[in-house]
Image (cartoon, grey):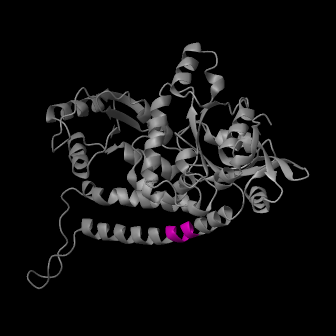
Amino acid sequence: MIDLEKEQNRKVRAFLVGEPGNSLTELKGLVDTLGLETAGTLTLTRLEIQPAYGMGSGKAHEICDLAKEAESDCIIFDFNLEPTKQRNWEKLSKIPCFDRQEVIIRIFAQRAQTKEAVLQVELARLTYSLPRLAHSYGDMARQRGGSYGSKGAGETQLELDQRRIRTKIMQTKKELSEVVRTRETQRKKRSGLPVPECALIGYTNAGKSSLLNALTGADSFVENKLFATLDPLTRRLNLKDGQGILMTDTVGFISNLPHSLIDAFKSTLDEARLADLQLIVIDASDPNADQQYNTVLKVLEEIAPEPSLKDTSSSDNNTLNNKRLIILNKWDAVTGNAIDTAALDVLFPDAIKVSAKTKYGFDELSDKISEKLLGSSRKYEIPAQETELLKKIRSSGIILSEEWKDSTVLIKARITGKTEALARPYITESDNEI
């Protein structure tokens, strides 16, 4: 006899299928985050491009049989599944079949909280589902309008739903554009302030939110699951020399991030793209840290085909290509393993090692952020008659000390860009120990 209560509480079981050489570790993490249970897995030894299933029919039948034996409720593919192939798979297996894109979109839908995030996820979901409506209907009969010959054939239910979704996409885009305008206004107000901005960027679950909380005392939501953060959160961070900056926690990246999500989350991803300094956070305890770093760089290339939208012609800021800092987070989890630490030193020789849990490395991180955003601390002896240069240093730099002599001014300051170039002839010595 079936235990009804146990059956009701049973998680949906998924059978996972991966491409050759894929360990399916990432997909398992996504499935777990979605709340599903992995019933079984299969990594293909080769992938033949066949029109019906994307592979040979024999392998397709084998996968369906394995999924049935594992008592799976659905089959999830770790590669893109075209709408026609999705329909063929569901006909063959008699259970729902979908790809990692749909898994990610469903996770985003579960975690969206603010109006902007809800609209962004809705737009991605509608865009993704529009070409896939056919697999939900099968051979549904047409609706006829009037007697034969008096009117043309009526629209199918599929056509009606496609039109309804297109209308909904237009409405969602309109609502989202209004929310985006508000975000753009807020960003312009921030950019008008003499406060540099940096963004925490990285693979999902790399510890960005924990790092923001530890550095700034923020209360950003933290959970040991993928995509715990969807909405950017900005907080002020006071550096060691007293200068304040704005630090923003951004949505995590992942390999093969659906383009529908990239397009929908464009305004949110702009926080990463337009930051004065990009802090690329890497989970040092993850064995695939190098792959995750490459994924982050790939996504950054997708969302930022140009270096920056900021007008750098009249700014002392360098381009974003020169404003990146790699942070190896969760260093406390690898310090006892000499092999892992040595490998990470080779892969990321210039990275800052920190721990959001123990606050290890925070002083060095503060110094590096200051250096990247505000320039190195140097001493200058500037002629007293260079009043315009002195004004520029005061307005665009950080003066740490100032002493007037008879004909010169001794200044210890952090300055960057054009102002630094103008002041360079007057450098007396460098002082990076503040």
- For this orientation, the residue located farthest to the left is 149
**Which quarter of the picture shows residue 268?**
bottom right
**Residue 186, placed above or below residue 292:** below
Q: Residue at x 67, y 31 (%)?
A: 354
Q: Residue at x 71, y 56 (%)?
A: 195
Quadrant location, the N terminus: top left
Quadrant location, the C terminus: top right
Count all numbered tags in the image, as a single digit. Answer: 0
Q: Is residue 177 magenta?
A: yes
Q: Position of residue 326 (x, y in %)?
A: 58, 36
433 and 288: which is toward the camera = 433
**Which quarter of the picture shows residue 160?**
bottom left
Res. 7 visible in picture: no
Task: Please give left or right for residue 274 compared with residue 416 in the image.
Answer: left
286 and 414: which is toward the camera = 414
388 and 6: which is toward the camera = 388
Q: Position of residue 87 (x, y in %)?
A: 23, 49
Res. 92 visible in picture: yes
Q: Residue at x 44, y 33 (%)?
A: 26
Q: Is residue 204 magenta?
A: no
**Residue 428, placed above or below residue 276:** above
Main secondary-structure element of the magenta-colored stretch: helix
Q: Which residues are magenta?
A: 176-181
218 and 131: which is toward the camera = 218
- For this orientation, the residue located farthest to the bottom is 150
Q: Position of residue 197 (x, y in %)?
A: 66, 53
Task: Please give left or right for residue 284 compared with residue 409 in the image.
Answer: left
